[in-house]
Image: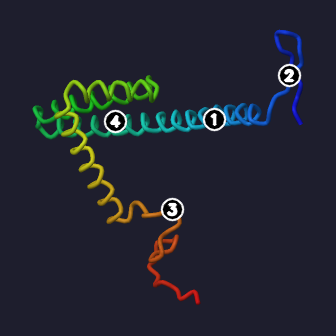
Amino acid sequence: MADPIDTPSGVGAERTGGERARMILAELADAAQSAALSVVEAQRARAATKVADIATAMHAAAHSLEQSSNPAVAECARSAADQVAAAAATIRGRSWSGLLADLEQAARRQPATFVAAAVVIGFVAGRLVTALTRDGAVAPTAGGNRWTGSDGAASPPRDLT
C-alpha cells in the first residue's frame, strides 16, 4: 500500500515501494555508519592507551639505563619515549579520519621513509606476535585451537565420526 503525501501543489501523491526501500536503506546505511564510527573510536581510544603504556615502559627503561651509568643511551631512550608519548597524545586527541589524513600526507611527502617505516613496524609486530605465541603468553585463538584446549593443555584431535 502506498502512503499519501502532500505535495507543493496540494495534490496527494503516493510513495512507491521503491522510494520506501531507498529511505529504509538510507536509514540502515546511516545506522551502520554510526555503529562503525563508534567501534572505530573505541579502538582509537584503546590504541592510544596501549601506545601510552609503551611510552611509560620506555621511560622506565630510560631511567634504568640512566641508573646503570649509560647516560647517552638513556638520553636516546628518553627521547624515543617522549616521541611515543607524543604519538599517544596525538592518537587520543584526533579522530581516525584526521589521523589517516596525516598519515596520507606523510606518505605523499616522503614515500620512501613511509614504506621503510611500514616494513620496520610490520617486522617488529610480526616478531612480537611470534614471540608471544611461542612463549604461550597469547593463545592463537580465543577458544583454543584444535591441538590445544582452552586450558592450554595439549590434546590430540578427536575422531568425530
Residue 20 in percent (x, y) is at 77, 33
Q: Residues within 10 Å of mark 4 (few under 14, many from 20)?
A: some
Q: Nearer the viewer, mark 4 or mark 1?
A: 1
Disc 2 residue type (three-letter):
Ala
How far is disc 1 from disc 3 in space, using C-alphas? Answer: 31 Å
State the residue position of label 3: 142
Structural distance between the alpha carbons of marks 2 and 3: 55 Å
First reached walking from the N terminus: tag 1 or tag 3: 1
Q: CA distance from mark 4 to mark 3?
A: 28 Å
Q: Are marks 2 and 4 in contact (CB under 8 Å)?
A: no
Q: Secondary structure at mark 2?
A: strand
Q: Residue at x 26, y 55 (%)?
A: 127
Q: Which mark is residue 114?
A: none
**Disc ID at residue 13:** 2
Q: Pick whichever of labels 2 and 1 is earlier in the sequence.
A: 2
Number of the label disc, if any, that sits on residue 29: 1
Residue drawn at point x = 89 percent, y = 15 percent: 11
State the CA–CA distance, disc 2 to disc 4: 65 Å
Mark 2–mark 1 distance (CA, rounded to whole Å):
26 Å
Residue labelled with disc 4: 56
Question: Dot 2, crowdedness within 10 Å: few (<14), some or many (≥20)?
Answer: few
Q: From the viewer's perspective, is the residue at label 2 or at label 3 nearer?
A: 2
